[in-house]
Amino acid sequence: MSLLPSDLDLDMSELEGRRFTCDPSCGLCCLCQPEVLPNEADWFKRSHPRRLVEKKRPHQHFALALKGGQGACTFLNPSRRCEIYAHRPHYCRQFPFHVYLGRRAQVELDLSCRGVWYGGTEDAMVEGGRMVHDNLDAIRETLQETRDVYREFEANCRDAGIYRPEEALRREVDRRIEMFAELPYLAHVLDLSAEDEEMSLPDAPGGPVDAAELQRSVMEMGLESLAAEDVFSAPVYCDPNWRWNLFLVKDGGLRWAFLNDDGTLDAAKEVDPGKVRLLTPEGEGKGIFLSYMRVLNRRDSMMGYAAYLVDDYGYEDYPSNTYYGVMAATALDLLWRSSLVAHLRGGRLDRAGMIEGIISYDMDRLDAPAIGAFL
């Protein structure tokens, strides 16, 4: 941390107290097709020209080829070791850290990485600080752009008469965070967030909830969050046996399959999503769930996602309604995803079950759009 300049507005609080170790049996990060930066491309063009592919979305760039076009990186060998570790691209080196740039720089930790859950040899604060130090110029340059975006967003909110300070919204969520583990409360918050009037977070559920209707609505929300155009875009869950689980949505049903390194699929079975019972955290699992919700409430990218929605809706909805609704919807989505994993593994949302649910979910959460930028 001493290597970092004091004038950089930087938040690394999510890394405090965390240690991790990358387990080479996992390989989850090798399923994320990394962009090859311009200063890295020459080496790959000289040494491995056939391992580069040109991509046109979201912008024109080079990336490393994937096995079968949808499997692991072509440099991942059968033992799940990287063949070019010393020359791996910036995006590979950065995992499991994400640097979100908005009004400030904030380092977030990808909690889909199994290595961050069980301690280890690497200090997240030290490694995160080193990664920030190595990219200071890019961080400073991008911050100038994202701060302009945030200033424009705030001005638009003020013009529309809907501006509310972000920290005030966070405080309201934090004050009632214990209630976010209760399904009736989450349903009530979602209902209020859809109203035209500006909402405040309630102190209690609004009344009786139709359990069957809530189960159906959350299932539909969960299936929507799992939906993907193709196998490459589908959410991946690396289970305790280091298998890459895919959940493929089709015609309202769910296909559970395993992705092999070479991009082929081993079908496991068809899953009836209607039989996935929506569970709530129990025992130590409740503490794990609430701790994760607190992490989300502190992430600038989460607030940036709510801002993205406010902008997308044309500044017709209050940021408070949008943010509270996003937090409630995220809690329900996580609980359904966790319930799906528990359903397939024969578990509950105790400590172990809740950790598995977050592992299956957080990478998708970090992929959500926001008005800022990830480095």
Image (cartoon, helix red, strand yellow):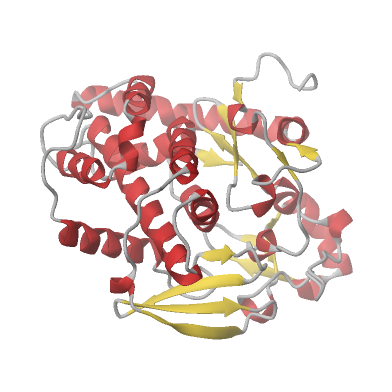
Place of residue 141 in the rendered image (x, y in percent of width and height, measured from the top left): 63, 31
- Quadrant of the rendering where the N terminus is positioned: top right
Residue at screen point 59% across, 32% down: 14
Q: Nearer the viewer, residue 268 or 138?
A: 268
Place of residue 254 in the rendered image (x, y in percent of width and height, measured from the top left): 38, 77
Figure check: 293 above or below 51: above
Question: Would you identify the image quadrant in which residue 283 lies?
Answer: top left
- Quadrant of the rendering where the C terminus is positioned: top right
In the picture as drawn, the residue positioned furthest to the front comes out as 283
Question: Would you identify the image quadrant in which residue 343 lies?
Answer: bottom left
Question: Would you identify the image quadrant in which residue 307 lies?
Answer: top left
Place of residue 33 in the rendered image (x, y in percent of width and height, measured from the top left): 64, 63
Q: Nearer the viewer, residue 75 or 219?
A: 219
Residue at screen point 39% across, 41% down: 305
238 relative position to 123: left or right: left
42 relative position to 218: left or right: right
Residue at screen point 81% across, 41% down: 121
Q: Nearer the viewer, residue 110 or 294?
A: 294
51 relative position to 374: left or right: right
In the picture as drawn, the residue positioned furthest to the top comes out as 6
Place of residue 164 in the rendered image (x, y in percent of width and height, measured from the top left): 28, 22
| Count of numbered badges drawn on the protein | 0
Residue at screen point 49% across, 55% down: 357
